[in-house]
Each structure stands twice: as C-alpha cells, then as structure tokens.
Amino acid sequence: MKTIIIALVAVFGLVGVASAQESLAVANQNRCGLIQARIQNRAVNYDNSKAKHLSAYNNLKDRLIKFEARLSGKGFDTTTLKADMAVLNGKIDQFAADYGLYMSRLRETQNYACGKSDGEFKTKLSESRNLLLKVHEDSKAIREYYASNIKTDLKNLQAQIRIKVQEGEDK
C-alpha cells in the first residue's frame, strides 16, 4: 500500500513539475513576443521622430540660407553667419549619422532569438541606448549652438539693418 501511495505521489508530483515547466516556457515565449513588439514599435516611433527632427533642422537651414542670401545681396556683412551656418550644417549631419547608427543597432536586436542569444540581445540593446544618449546630446548641441551663435549673428545683422536705415533717413 505504501509503494502505491509513493508511486502516485511521484507520478503526480512529476506531472506538476512538467506542467510548471511548460507554463514557464509559454510565459517566456509570450514575454519574448511582447519585447519584440515593443522594440518594433519603438523603432517606428524613432523613425518618425528622426524625420520630424531632420525636417525642422532642414527648414532652419533653408530659412537661414535664404535670409543670408537676401542680406548679402543688399550689401550686409554676413561672413560670421555663413561660418556659423557651416558649423550648424556639420552638427546636423552628425545628428543624422548618429541617429542612423542608433536605429541600426536597435534593429539589430530584432535579429536575436529571445532567450537563446547568450546575452547578445542585452549587449546590443545597451549599445543602442548609449547611442540614443549620443543622439540626444547632438540634438541639444544643435539647439544650444543656434541659441548662442546663430541668434547672436542675427541680432548683429539686425543692428546693421537699423544703422543702414538710420543712415538712409539722415540723407
């Protein structure tokens, strides 16, 4: 009688362990699917964000180019604005390059099988997060450069315009 009870406990105990392992595997598989979906969603959102940023930066470049051409055509000194626009273009190009590198690292995480990549997934995800920080720094550098240099150049040009207008009224 004891052996039958021990055998039944052993059989039911192993069945419980097997079903627990199966449910853990299913839960891990569901979690992997959710992680991959979140990464895909973030990649799409960051693509849209990149397009918006680059559109705004290109609009800024175009407006500055038109403004500089108009003022230089009227005889104003726009050399500092031209030099600062060249630096701004370099910062925008750096932003675009870093953003592209970030997106490629983020998309590389989708190449790894969930739970079977021996930490490579986490490594690539960590690399992409570090690159995202670099992208944020690039964006901040563009804003700060515009505020500290380009706006100063525009104010100097505005002062030149005032002086020229006053000279025209004095004649």
Image (spheres, rainbow, N blue to C red):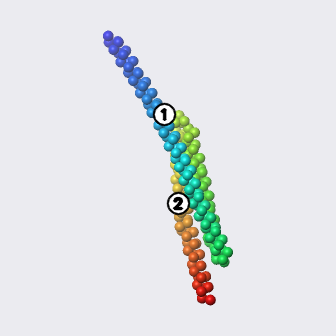
Whether residue 88 is visible: no
Looking at numbered disc 2 in the image, what kind of residue is underneath it?
Lys
23, 2: nearer the viewer: 23
69, 18: nearer the viewer: 69
Q: Earlier in the sequence, mark 1 or mark 2?
A: 1
Residue visible at 42% across and 25% down? 19
- Estimate how packed mark 2 is, as few (under 14), some (14 to 19) or many (20 or more) residues with alpha carbons within 10 Å: few
What is the x, y in percent for residue 156? 57, 75
Q: Please, is residue 98 above or below residue 107 in the view?
A: below
Q: Which residue is mark 1?
A: 29
Residue visible at 62% across and 70% down? 67
- Disc sitting over residue 101 in the figure: none
Looking at numbered disc 1 in the image, what kind of residue is underneath it?
Gln
Please identify the quarter of the rendering in which residue 62 is found.
bottom right
Residue visible at 64% across and 68% down? 66
What is the x, y in percent for residue 161? 59, 79
Please state if 6 lies on the left or on the right of 48 as rendered: left
Please identify the quarter of the rendering in which residue 64 is found.
bottom right
In terms of secondary structure, where does tag 2 sit?
Answer: helix
Q: Please, is residue 122 above or below residue 65 in the view?
A: above
- Estimate how packed mark 1 is, as few (under 14), some (14 to 19) or many (20 or more) residues with alpha carbons within 10 Å: some
Whether residue 152 is visible: yes
Q: Please, is residue 69 above or below residue 51 in the view?
A: below
- Contact between marks 1 and 2 (CB within 8 A): the answer is no
What is the x, y in percent for residue 25? 46, 30
Please identify the quarter of the rendering in which residue 152 is found.
bottom right
Quarter holding the C terminus is bottom right
Seen as rendered, the residue at the extreme top is 1
What is the x, y in percent for residue 53? 56, 57
- Disc sitting over residue 140 in the figure: 2
